Image (cartoon, rainbow, N blue to C red):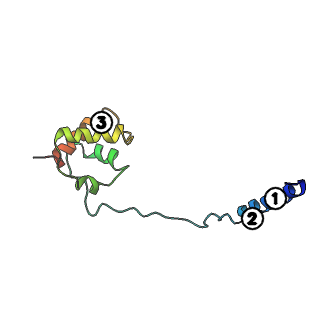
Amino acid sequence: MTKQSLIVLGIVAALGASALAATKAAPPKGTATISLPGDAGMAFKPGPGAGVVQGQCLSCHSSAYVSTQPQLTRAQWTAEVAKMKNVYGAPIPDDQAPAIVDYLTTQYGKP
């Protein structure tokens, strides 16, 4: 390639890059809202530990999500709470995990 060809190629590349930059989409104007699904009329069943469960579990999912899970044994609920904490990073304090397991086993566990 000649020096003149390289200069022309450089100009074409620069023009192409500036054309792409000029076509960049502008951010949307106004306010955006997000509507999350409700609890479908479901709420955590009342009982000892319900407040702890509401405080820890509702930050990630609804009470309807918990209410529609299959009935689990204490060992299975213990594993679920551990998974939420250790795998998904739920900020459940260690001293509150047993109360959550007790509540879930009592209210949503296998009879």
Mark closer to the observer (1, 2)? 1
Q: Is residue 41 left or right of residue 88?
A: left
Where residue 40 appears, as percent x and y from the top left, is 28, 63
Task: Report the residue at 82% width, 56% height from top.
Answer: 10
Q: Nearer the viewer, residue 94 or 68?
A: 68
Q: Farthest residue in the front direction?
A: 1
Q: Nearer the viewer, residue 61 or 26?
A: 26
Instruction: Tell me which numbered mark, 3 or 2, is placed earlier along the sequence.
Output: 2
Q: Nearer the viewer, residue 46 or 36?
A: 36
Measure the alpha-carbon separation of dots 3 and 2: 57 Å
Measure the alpha-carbon separation of dots 3 and 1: 66 Å
Q: Residues within 10 Å of mark 2 (few under 14, many from 20)?
A: few
Task: Report the residue at 25% width, 39% height from top.
Answer: 79
Mark closer to the observer (3, 2)? 2
Instruction: Tell me which numbered mark, 1 or 2, is placed earlier along the sequence.
Output: 1
Give the residue at mark 2.
19
- SS class, disc 3: loop
What amino acid is labelled 3 in the image?
Gln
Quarter of the image with the N terminus in it = bottom right
Disc number placed over residue 90 in the picture, else none: none
Q: Residues within 10 Å of mark 3 (few under 14, many from 20)?
A: few
Give the residue at mark 3.
96
Disc number placed over residue 9 in the picture, else none: 1
Instruction: Tell me which numbered mark, 3 or 1, is placed earlier along the sequence.
Output: 1
Measure the alpha-carbon separation of dots 1 and 2: 15 Å
As displayed, is residue 60 above or below residue 8? above
Where residue 98 appears, as percent x and y from the top left, is 24, 35
What amino acid is labelled 2 in the image?
Ala
Image quadrant of residue 5?
bottom right
What amino acid is labelled 1 in the image?
Leu
